Image (cartoon, rainbow, N blue to C red):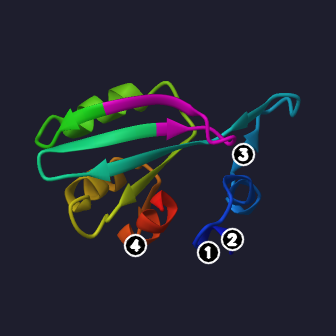
Amino acid sequence: MVWLERGADANDLKSDMPTRSFHSNDAKETQVAVIIGIDPHKASHTAAALNEAEAVLGELGVRSGPAQLEQLLTWAAQWPDRTWAIEGAGGLGYLLAQQLAAGGEHVLDVQPKLAARVRL
């Protein structure tokens, strides 16, 4: 897969990234899913919503704590067909990943070393 290779061109990444879409009942309107990436830290989490062209649709920073879930879900409500991608869902993102999954959200774990390779 291209996205795992060091020095991969950003244009190469787009062709290799999976996208998900669904068709409405009338089959004329197509809506593309939004990926909401979360970069968790001890005191705060940063969220970015991306469309299929990897354009940033919105960003939000929240403090880690009891109100984090409500703030993120309120913000993300504008994209009903969404998937959450949390870096290190078994580490710093564990609580948030569990809260989202318990609320019926689709959550993916992004391994921190894979995210680090993309940043290179």
Q: Secondary structure at mark 2?
A: helix
Specify the amino acid type for callout 2. Val
Distance from disc 1 to disc 4, alpha carbons, whole Å, reads 12 Å
- In magenta, the rendered stretch is 49-60
Specify the amino acid type for callout 1. Glu
Which residue bears the numbered disc 3? 21
Question: Relative to 104, is 66 above or below?
Answer: above
In the rendered structure, the answer to whether residue 91 lies left or right of residue 4 reads left
Which residue bears the numbered disc 4? 113
Q: Residue at x 22, y 34 (%)?
A: 62
**The disc label shown at residue 2, or none:** 2
Q: Which comes sooner in the sequence, label 3 or label 1?
A: 1
Q: Are marks 2 and 3 in contact (CB under 8 Å)?
A: no
Q: Are marks 1 and 2 in contact (CB under 8 Å)?
A: yes
Distance from disc 4 to disc 3, alpha carbons, whole Å, reads 27 Å
Which residue bears the numbered disc 1? 5
**The disc label shown at residue 85, or none:** none
